[in-house]
Amino acid sequence: VKTDGKHSYCFFHQSFHDALQERHRKEAELRQALEHDQLVMYYQPRVDVATGATSSMEALVRWAHPTRGIVEPNDFIPLAEETGLIVRLGELVIDKVCAQLAFWSRQGDPLVPVSVNVSPRQFTQTDIARMLGDCLQRHQVDPALLEVELTESSMSGDGDEVARTLSAIQRMGVKLLVDDFGTGYSSLSQLQRLDFDVLKVDRAFTAQLEKTREGTVLFSAIITMAHGLGMRVVAEGVETLEQMRALKALRCDEIQGFLVSRPLPAADLPSRLRQGLVP
Ligand code: C2E
Ligand code: CA
Ligand code: CA
Ligand code: CA
């Protein structure tokens, strides 16, 4: 192929321009979605390994797009992060979850705690503790019903500042969970200092359980460490019975994954919780 410097420059220039335009279009569309209340929450149960009971659920956002249908978060959370729209999105998510908890409570439906994902930017650039407190109060929701999931990247900033924010959240009675553990760069000493309640082990580790002996050794070491620090352990992405059995043998506390349930629309939860046990 003969390359023409000038043309390839123009081509590059053109595609860069297109990409930029596409991005602006997507950003405007996402902004509209936030304004027009197009976000919906799905809920994925977490199950106690010993009893099989649903101990809590994770709230996972979806975009009910007017033409594309239900859009998964991996399609819009990264853009929301880059553009700063995540701050507004995060507030809407917490408000929706509190409203849902209040609704279930009024209906007399079975209730378990619900965890929300808080992005690093939302954690470091807003007064998240205050936001959570206001929202709980506005909806008259028991703080013990709300939990916050943070990835290791949220903990990388100013150590004292991070610790202050975390303890402000915990003092309200809201539990703290480490999300995707093992994929980030948090040091073990940081983990010990910050006093989280629950460690959610990334599904990459769960996937290694059946594959290699080292996979089991590693998971076992994580569980021992977490228990030693007073944390409960959740295995993410559990898809097979073999993985569940292996985790039970390792004394993992809870599992979450397609084996137990996919994330479900809010309306499906009450009957699922009344049913109680793992299928
Ligand atoms: P995450 O926080 O690690 O959430 C777990 C993801 O794993 C969910 O994907 C869930 O559907 C999926 N999952 C659950 N069980 C299994 C399994 O057995 N196998 C496999 N392969 N996957 C499983 P989802 O809902 O598409 O969310 C993707 C990510 O988007 C989340 O990862 C989280 O980082 C982000 N996200 C979702 N909702 C929110 C939100 O409300 N706020 C923020 N800031 N981020 C969110
Ligand atoms: Ca999560
Ligand atoms: Ca996770
Ligand atoms: Ca602790």
Image (cartoon, rainbow, N blue to C red):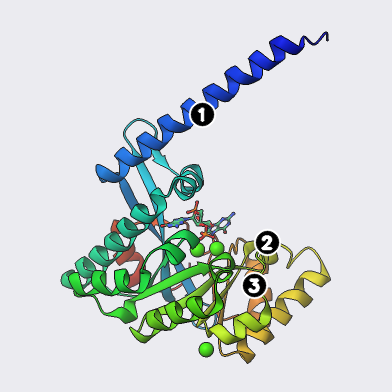
Q: Find numbered disc 2 in the image and state the secondary structure of the residue it sits on.
A: helix
What residue sits 30% from the left and 75% below the top?
A: 111
Circle 2 residues within 10 Å: few <14, some 14–19, many ≥20: some
Residue 116 visible within the image: yes
> Mark 2 vs ligand 3: CB under 8 Å?
no
Task: Judge by depth and name the residue closer to the eye, 122 or 30.
Answer: 122
Circle 3: is it few (<14), some (14-19), or many (20+) Cα within 10 Å? some
| Quadrant in the picture for residue 243 | bottom right
Q: In which quarter of the image is the N terminus?
A: top right
Q: Give the vertical position of 181 relative to 12 (above or below).
A: below
Mark 3 Cβ and ligand 3 under 8 Å apart: no
Q: Where is residue 41 in the image (x, y as percent from the top left)?
A: 35, 55
Outermost residue toward the left in this view: 106
Q: From the image, tell me which residue sits under label 3.
A: 186
N-term mark: 1 or 3: 1
How many numbered discs, if any?
Answer: 3
Residue 184, which numbered label? none
The three-letter code of the residue at mark 1 reads Leu
Mark 2 or mark 1, which is nearer the start of the sequence? 1
Where is mark 2, residue-wise?
A: 204
Query: Which residue is labeled 1 in the image?
Result: 20
| Residue found at x 83% / y 8% | 2
